Image (tube, rainbow, N blue to C red):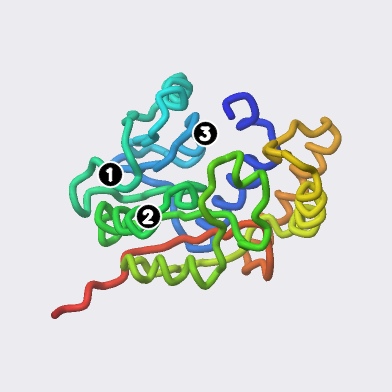
Amino acid sequence: MERLERTHWWFHGKRVAVGALLRRARVQDPSAEEVTVDVGCGTGAVLERFGGQSASIGIDDHWEALRHARMKAGPQLMLSDARALPFREASIDRIFLLDVAEHVQEDELVFAEVRRALNPNGLAVIHVPAHPALWSSHDEAVHHVRRYTRRRLKRRLEEAGLQPIVLTYTFAGILLPAVAVRAWKRKLPGHTRVDFDVSPGWMNRILHRWQDLEARWLGWRNLPFGLSLGAVVRCAPRVSQ
């Protein structure tokens, strides 16, 4: 992941999609007084891109990922589980939860923890894989436990007390190729490789540019289909009993 995160079109595409969704939601860069947390920070590229001037904290449950993230300037790092975040209630201004919830059996606990830790005026950015019908050896190899429908993600967010400002598909251009490739791979006995193969340089550049075009669209309106789902959410008002 450390080797691919800066240059691979997938990671680039996710970052530019997140940036477009934040612009669409009219979200400014975080200030020095704010606290930004990346839950499942991996090797630290998201905080490096979106941490801004804020106090940045990376959370992950893999020491090796945190070791790589430590090499990037800025973030404070913590070893923790997404189902039990080490923060006081309403103490965090901005939370990124990018391709994390699909790894956790009790995803409702993950979204509930985001809601608990989030400042009432803060926001969270969510990204998950879409379409359960696309389940393949890739999902098994990267330890997914589910892929989401748009309806399921929206329901999970609302159950946790999170209100979507933007909820859309991402990675539209690769949906049909992914359908074809994964259907082909299902016919290969014992195939367990992930889909993050290193593309030839020319293909990587083309896919980079395509993701930049999609991001321009996402900054304006939703994509009608895609391989993943992305959302910007805020805390829904609590209902008085």
User: Are the residues at dot 3 and dot 1 in contact (C-beta closer than 8 Å)?
Assistant: no
Q: In this view, does 4 lie to the left or right of 94?
A: right
Q: Which amino acid does label 1 sit on?
A: Leu
SS category of the residue bearing label 2 = loop
- Residue 55 shows which numbered tag? none
Question: In the figure, 16 relative to 146: above or below?
Answer: above
Q: Disc 2 versus disc 3: distance between alpha carbons?
A: 26 Å
Which residue of the protein is positioned furthest toward the front in this rendering? Answer: 189
Question: In the figure, 71 relative to 215: above or below?
Answer: above
Q: In this view, does 15 lie to the left or right of 119?
A: right
Q: Mark 2 points at which residue?
A: 106
Quadrant hosting residue 33: top left
Residue 69 % position (x, y): 45, 26
Residue 15 % position (x, y): 58, 45
Q: Disc 3 versus disc 1: distance between alpha carbons?
A: 20 Å
- Residue 85 shows which numbered tag? 1
Which residue of the protein is positioned furthest toward the right in this rendering? Answer: 202
SS category of the residue bearing label 3 = helix
- Residue 45 shows which numbered tag? 3
